[in-house]
Image (cartoon, helix red, strand yellow):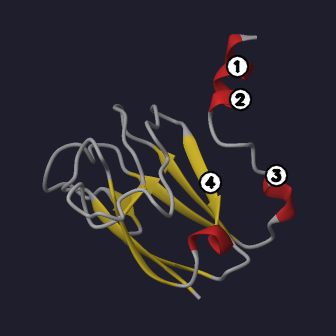
């Protein structure tokens, strides 16, 4: 039952079956080493009816946090995965992110950056 308690503390579960349009972003293995490729793809596009999902394929924890970095006053305001353990994923409807170009980064490794365009 502990696993369910952990899920309850996180964001409400998203029914992925309600989304026919899905955008997958992978946090690559070795992404925690500065200079290595990190988010794949680095730049993504999604329509407003899509579900955007980040999956951590690395061996250490990461985040997908909206904003250009820790100094951004808007950091985490649109989305924030919190800590994603290896093989864990985080999904957010593109409609909740909103239209436009949105940079994101990893709070633990701020040199890891990506961008998602909703529209």
Q: Are marks 2 and 4 in contact (CB under 8 Å)?
A: no
Image quadrant assignment for residue 74: bottom left
Give the CA separation, mark 2 to mark 4.
15 Å
Q: Picture coordinates of residue 110 (x, y %)?
A: 22, 52
Residue position marked by numbered label 3 in the rendering: 15
- Give left or right: position of 40 versus 19: left
Image quadrant assignment for residue 9: top right
Q: Earlier in the sequence, mark 1 or mark 3?
A: 1
Observer-nearest residue: 56 or 117? Answer: 117
x 37%, y 39%: residue: 58
Q: Picture coordinates of residue 97 (x, y %)?
A: 57, 70
Q: Are marks 1 and 2 in contact (CB under 8 Å)?
A: yes
Mark 2, mark 4: which one is toward the viewer? 2
Q: Earlier in the sequence, mark 2 or mark 3?
A: 2
Mark 4, mark 1: which one is toward the viewer? 1
**The residue tagged with tag 3: helix, strand or loop?**
loop
Q: Are marks 1 and 3 in contact (CB under 8 Å)?
A: no
């Amino acid at each position: 039952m502990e696993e369910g308690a952990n899920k309850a503390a996180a964001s409400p579960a998203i029914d992925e079956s309600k989304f026919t349009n899905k955008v997958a972003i992978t946090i690559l293995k070795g992404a925690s080493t500065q200079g290595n490729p990190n988010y794949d793809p680095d730049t993504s596009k999604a329509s407003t009816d899509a579900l955007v999902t980040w999956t951590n394929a690395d061996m250490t924890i990461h985040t997908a946090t909206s904003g250009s970095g820790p100094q951004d006053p808007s950091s985490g305001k649109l989305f924030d995965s919190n800590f994603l353990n290896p093989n864990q994923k985080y999904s957010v409807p593109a409609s909740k992110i909103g239209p436009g170009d949105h940079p994101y980064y990893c709070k633990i490794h701020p040199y890891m950056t990506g961008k998602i365009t909703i529209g």
